[in-house]
Image (cartoon, grey):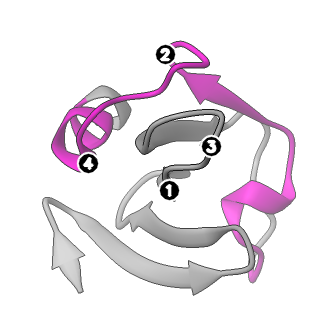
Amino acid sequence: MTQQGFTQVDRNAGTTWLCDTRPVWVVHYPTTPARNEFYQAYKAVQPVPRGRMPWTVDNRRIGTDQGFRTLQDAMGAAA
């Protein structure tokens, strides 16, 4: 599924939307007893070797540790 220049991929950490043009991505974190559902955007801070995914290199969170309430907000921050 593609949305706003992001492609949905499945990985062990859960549903992830990978940017089609830059080494940024958004991860969905479901509701748990300790926190409400949120979306978190990340960016790679070093070059991503050919054939690897950006979350396999050093990366940083975009925004706060509270994340974003909606997928659209997280994608907007990552853009």
Spatial CA span between label 2 and label 3: 23 Å
Q: Say if mark 1 contacts mark 3, CB within 8 Å.
A: no
User: Mark 1 vs mark 2: which is more N-terminal?
Assistant: 1
Type of amino acid at the residue the image marks with label 3: Pro
Q: Which residues are magenta?
A: 51-76
Magenta stretch holds residue 60: yes
| Dot 3 crowding, Cα within 10 Å, few <14, some 14–19, many 20+ | few
Residue under pointer 2: 63
Residue at numbered disc 1:
30
Question: Where on the picture, by quarter, is residue 34?
Answer: top right
Q: Name the amino acid type tagged 4.
A: Leu
Q: Residue at x 35, y 67 (%)?
A: 20
Q: Where does residue 36 sit, x and y in percent of width and height?
A: 45, 37
Name the amino acid, label 2.
Gly
Return the x and y of residue 19 as percentages of the image width and height. 38, 60
Camera-nearest residue between 37 and 4:
37
Give SS at disc 3: loop
Amino acid tagged 1: Pro
Question: Which mark, by number, is residue 68?
Answer: none
User: Where residue 48 sits: x, y (%)?
Assistant: 75, 57
Mark 1 nearby-residue class (10 Å; few <14, some 14–19, many ≥20): few
For label 4, the residue is 71
Q: Could you tell me how far apart the alpha carbons at marks 1 and 2 are, in whole angstroms?
A: 18 Å
> Which element carries disc 4, helix, strand or loop?
helix
Q: Which residue is mark 3?
A: 33
Q: Is residue 62 left or right of residue 48?
A: left
